[in-house]
Amino acid sequence: MNIERMHTGERASKIVKHNGVVYLSGQVGTSDDSIHDQTQQCLDKIDAFLAEAGSSKEQLLQVTVWLSDMGHFADMNAVWNAWVPTGFAPARACGEAKLARVGLKVEIIVTAAY
Amino acid sequence: MNIERMHTGERASKIVKHNGVVYLSGQVGTSDDSIHDQTQQCLDKIDAFLAEAGSSKEQLLQVTVWLSDMGHFADMNAVWNAWVPTGFAPARACGEAKLARVGLKVEIIVTAAY
Amino acid sequence: MNIERMHTGERASKIVKHNGVVYLSGQVGTSDDSIHDQTQQCLDKIDAFLAEAGSSKEQLLQVTVWLSDMGHFADMNAVWNAWVPTGFAPARACGEAKLARVGLKVEIIVTAAY
């Protein structure tokens, strides 16, 4: 059971694959953009990383969403729901946490199968 | 390695099974109930979902607990400790995070074997 | 696919092994020590638990870092970056969350292969 890493920096790898499961680093969008736009930017990055890992949003297992302000819950969910393929929704949890930079409104952490 | 989902909505599946591991969506109780009651409600739901997934609290792997107020740590733990079977405790972490609705005091995120 | 637990208390096991993946309980340092020292203490404990589990920091999969104050991000990362072996960085996410005791500045949650 080898580990395969992609986009590996000194702090983190964007993608880590092991034994049929791919772990992505927490994805964020552009600081100060709207919650709608930041959520879409996260999901676009996730689509790209999953494709690179040989996975897809039809193979999501577990997703954690952090919002810097829970007041953005409905707006984040609108973008999320439009993105998740019908019948393929993962296990999910959402909590409020300040993120690494002021102006970041959402971070999405994905585990998927490949 | 197929993925099996149960109770799948547009946002999330309550249960996702893959390769011997079951991921549950974050479970919460009834807003404004006491921390004791909300914790017990979470654990009752987790018992039911694990049973449905062919798992049990004897097969917990990793659990994350979010409390909206860390002042509830001792009361949550009293309910938790009474629930966990002796000798079967999972890896666990507990942090403070505001949850999706005001009045929610605890959310529990479970990964287990099946 | 048996589950193996080590350092099992009534609340949590420090180490849970299953199907090639080891889950560690969230690790913290000594309350009121500096962020530098607390981060190093976490990582020292993680090194020891991974060794006990037959794993190592060359086999990290997914890491979540909680900081009680995101103002400690740079100082935590300096210790983290010095610890992670070049080319072996895991998927990582970092959010702000108050921790179980006042004075705790960082908690690190690790999943690794063994």
Image: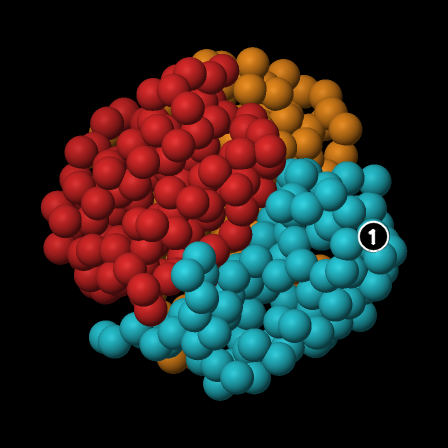
Chain colours: A orange, B red, C cyan
Q: Is residue A64 left or right of residue C99?
A: left
**Residue A101 on image: x %, y %:** 76, 34
**Residue A25 on image: x %, y %:** 57, 51
| Residue at (33% x, 50% y) in the render | B82
Q: Is residue A76 above or below residue A11?
A: above
**Residue C30 on image: x %, y %:** 76, 60
Residue B18 visible in the current orientation: no
**Residue C15 on image: x %, y %:** 47, 71
User: What is the quadrant of residue A81 in the picture?
Assistant: top left
Count how many numbered circles sit on residues in the image. 1
- Give the residue at mark 1: C32
Amino acid carrying label 1: it is Asp
| Chain label for disc 1 | C
Q: Is residue C91 above or below residue A74?
A: below
Q: Is residue C68 left or right of residue B22?
A: right
| Residue at (83% x, 52% y) in the render | C32
Of C38 and A13, the residue lying toward us? C38
10 Å crowding of disc 1: few (<14), some (14-19), many (20+): few
| Residue at (21% x, 33% y) in the render | B8
Of B86 and C18, the residue lying toward us? B86
Q: Is residue B51 above or below residue A76?
A: below
Of C15 and B73, the residue lying toward us? B73
User: What is the quadrant of residue C2 in the picture?
Assistant: bottom left
User: What is the quadrant of residue C13 in the picture?
Assistant: bottom left
Q: Is residue C28 left or right of residue B104?
A: right
Q: Is residue C93 above or below residue A4?
A: above
Of C51 and A21, the residue lying toward us? C51
Q: Secondary structure at mark 1?
A: loop
